[in-house]
Amino acid sequence: MVTGGSKGIGRGIAAVFAEAGANVAVAARSVGDLDAAVTELDSIGDGKVIGVAADVSDPASCAALASQVADAFGGIDVLCANAGIFPEAPLATMTPDELAQVLDVNVKGTVFAVQACLPSLIESGRGRVILTSSITGPITGFPRWSHYGASKAAQLGFMRTAAIELAPHAITVNAIMPGNILTEGLKDMGEDYLAGMARAIPAGALGTPADIGHLAAFLATDEAGYITGQAIAVDGGQVLPESPDAVTP
């Protein structure tokens, strides 16, 4: 199950699992986006793909989502808690509602999704929880996204204790911290902007949603069963240079 799976990084994660032959459920608020995602994903692999409309900031919606997915597939083995929002808000003018909206989706939504899936994950005997965090907040900062950065750091605090609590049930809990990933939102910024971003990354290019999906797929395997409570950056080395001059052309 991939929350926020209808586009961007979530869709890339869902596509990698679909290519591997898994049954995949994508969840999102927009029915139109879900329908388009399911149509594309259904043509990729041999597994079944379903879309479920849900709002992760609402615990009742998360419970209904988990129930519908478990009924469709006979259980839930892997939860990719990917749903997140990133509206701009300068710290000096950020309103309580703007702060609450980001924390409700990015932090509470993560917790609610895990809670809703927990009975199925325990029943599976080898559950996997994979959170989509970010380098922004846990490692770096960016102006106008202090509420977003706080939410992404909070996910990692949740992850570490959840990993301890769920380990006796053979459930692992890990997080992926994407750097600059080429999604729909970034493409809208224009080629000059994207080229400038790429020049600041040692790998010389922005990442793709599939780059995040491949790590999620590995963390879902039996071979990754001894990895838990870890946050792994997938950023092409973006956080490594101490100045732009350190990145060779």
Image (tube, grey):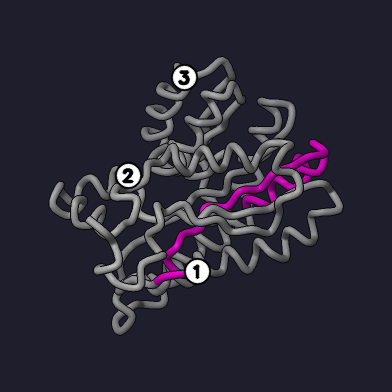
Q: Which residue is mark 2?
A: 183
Picture quarter with the C terminus: bottom left
Q: Which residues are the magenta region?
A: 113-140
Q: Secondary structure at mark 2?
A: loop
Q: Residues within 10 Å of mark 3 (few under 14, many from 20)?
A: some
Q: Residue at x 29, y 76 (%)?
A: 90
Q: Position of residue 196 (x, y in %)?
A: 19, 57
Q: Which residue is mark 3?
A: 44
The quarter of the picture where residue 59 lies is bottom right
Q: Which residue is mark 1?
A: 138
Q: Residue at x 47, y 19 (%)?
A: 44
Q: Residues within 10 Å of mark 1 (few under 14, many from 20)?
A: some
Q: Position of residue 145 (x, y in %)?
A: 35, 70
Q: Is residue 114 above or below residue 53?
A: below
Q: Is residue 9 above or below residue 134?
A: above
Q: What amino acid does circle 2 point to?
A: Thr
